[in-house]
Amino acid sequence: MGGKAKVIKKATIPVSLPVSVVDKIEELRAKLGYRSRNDVIREAINRFIEEIEKSKVLYVRDLTLEQAKKEIIEYLKHREAAYVSEIAENLGINIELAFKAVKELEEERVIGE
């Protein structure tokens, strides 16, 4: 019935920190009930990694207004509707440029109702 315990390989990484940071870590350790400063540091690193993994990094291409308008028209041919932020994210268009392009396309009556 007893399963094997999972072995987690560990590495030691020497890190130099300002004394003021070490003092703050020690203060948090005591306040939060951690056994050691290492536990606080491990928890902080794990939370940082989780936060970064949840974050999106968007690549924004350098487009002219006319290029953006053409791509938006093509994008909308395959959809009933879309938020400008969605268009910008999916096409890699700067958000301000996307809003400007959509506004012009609406004024030109190329898109919209």
Image (cartoon, helix red, strand yellow):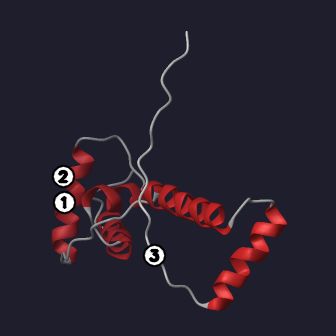
Nearer to us: label 1 or label 3? 3
Tell which of 103 and 108 is nearer to you: 103
Q: Amino acid at mark 3?
A: Pro
Q: Which residue in the structure is indicated by mark 3?
A: 14
Q: Is residue 57 left or right of residue 52?
A: left
Q: CA distance from mark 2 to mark 3?
A: 53 Å
Q: Are marks 1 and 2 in contact (CB under 8 Å)?
A: yes
Q: Which residue in the structure is indicated by mark 1?
A: 71
* Residue 74 % position (x, y): 18, 52
Between discs 1 and 3, the one toward the N terminus: 3
Badge 1: residue crowd in 10 Å (few <14, some 14–19, many ≥20): some
Tell which of 77 and 36 is nearer to you: 36
Q: Amino acid at mark 2?
A: Glu
Q: Is residue 9 left or right of residue 91?
A: right
List the single residue furthest toward the right. 31
Q: Is residue 12 left or right of residue 68?
A: right
Residue at the (22%, 45%) spot, across then down = 77
As drawn, 96 above or below 113: below
Q: Amino acid at mark 1?
A: Glu
List the single residue furthest toward the top. 1
Badge 3: residue crowd in 10 Å (few <14, some 14–19, many ≥20): few
Q: CA distance from mark 1 to mark 3?
A: 50 Å
Q: Which residue in the structure is indicated by mark 2?
A: 74
Q: CA distance from mark 1 to mark 2?
A: 5 Å
Residue at the (64%, 60%) spot, across then down = 39
* Residue 29 % position (x, y): 75, 67
Badge 2: residue crowd in 10 Å (few <14, some 14–19, many ≥20): few
